[in-house]
Image (spheres, helix red, strand yellow):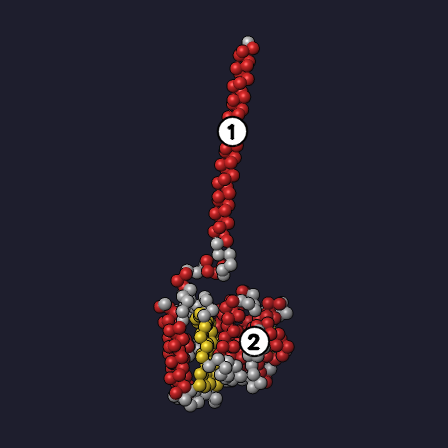
Amino acid sequence: MIQILQKRGRFLLIALIVSSSLFVTTAAYVLFFTRIRSDTSRSFSTSYALIDPARSLIGQEHFFSSIEPLRRNLKELAARYEKEGGEIGVYFEYLNTGANISINQDKRFWPASLSKMPTALVVMKKIERGDWKLTNEFVIFPEDRNDAFGTLWQKPAGTRLTIEELLKELLINSDDTAHRILIRNLSAGEFEDMLFALGIEEMYDKNYNITAKEYSRIFRALYSSSYLEREYSQMLLAWLSETRFHEFLGSGLPPDVIFAHKIGEHDPEVIYFDSGVVYAPNRPYLLTVMVDAKQSGGKEKAKEIMSVISRAAYEYVANN
């Protein structure tokens, strides 16, 4: 009987040792592979921890590094136009990488209707802060009516329009009456705050003239949503893409490519501008062209050079 108990005791001891060994081995196995998975996951998540996260969202082929051929082409086109007596300023920026081209970057032009963009940003900032609502209404005063651009001047004094209606008229139809109404309800300090926030306090010189490069920063701020929250940047860009003015840079683009832009023109001074974001598939870029055509064939020549520059930029971006 004692021998049987002793045998059973040895058996139980051996079973206990084996079980303990299996437990330790299993635990070690689980711990080892859990650590491998953890390290592997950590490796994938931190492999490019110091690189712009957007690089993982857009294919590498859309981050081409050189735009030198385009730089040479645009400079040649600008030089040719200048030989014909025109004055021109050009700014191009490939938004995936920030690579840019600036031609006559210090050349200043009177902005004409391009001045409506800063107004739109200031108004939308008031909407974003809750100071105003898009449904708030303003009244047309007699002194607001201006027949240079748009049709709101045809409405009688006393007509009430919502801020949303005014912004749409301002951006889609470049309506001067809408601009006067909005300007009348804003302060100089609010414009200064906007320019300071964007880092473009010196965008205007003492004569209120601007450069293509500095003005382009307004559209970059909209595209990156660095001044307004995404909801409000998206809203402005969507309205800008609905504009009916396609005779300048828009004429050099395929009809199915979205172009959110603002034009400016002043026929008495024979100056013409276009600036905005071209949404080439996976390869968006910013393009601004400012032209003084007094000595180079007027508006038709301005339209021609803008179309040629726009087509050259698009073809390079789309095919490289």
Residue 141 in view, yes or no: yes
- Residue depicted at 48% across the width and 80% down the height: 105
Residue 31's place in the image compared with 152, above or below, is above
The amino acid at mark 1 is Ser
The image position of residue 264, as x and y in percent, is: 48, 81
Q: Nearer the viewer, mark 2 or mark 1?
A: 1
* In front of the other: 11 or 115: 11
- The residue wearing badge 1 is 21
* In front of the other: 206 or 304: 206
Q: Quadrant of residue 255?
A: bottom left
* In front of the other: 280 or 161: 280
SS at mark 2? loop
SS at mark 1? helix
The image position of residue 18, as x and y in percent, is: 50, 26
Q: Residue furthest top?
A: 1
Instruction: Give the Cα separation between the discs numbered 2 and 1.
Output: 71 Å
Q: Count neighbours of disc 2 (C-alpha within 10 A) and say few if under 14, some if 14 to 19, many if 20 or more.
A: some
Residue 9's place in the image compared with 277, above or below, is above
Q: Count neighbours of disc 1 (C-alpha within 10 A) and say few if under 14, some if 14 to 19, many if 20 or more.
A: few
The image position of residue 65, as x and y in percent, is: 41, 67
- Residue depicted at 50% across the width and 33% down the height: 26
The quarter of the picture where the N terminus appears is: top right
- Residue depicted at 62% across the width and 67% down the height: 129
The amino acid at mark 2 is Ile
- The residue wearing badge 2 is 200
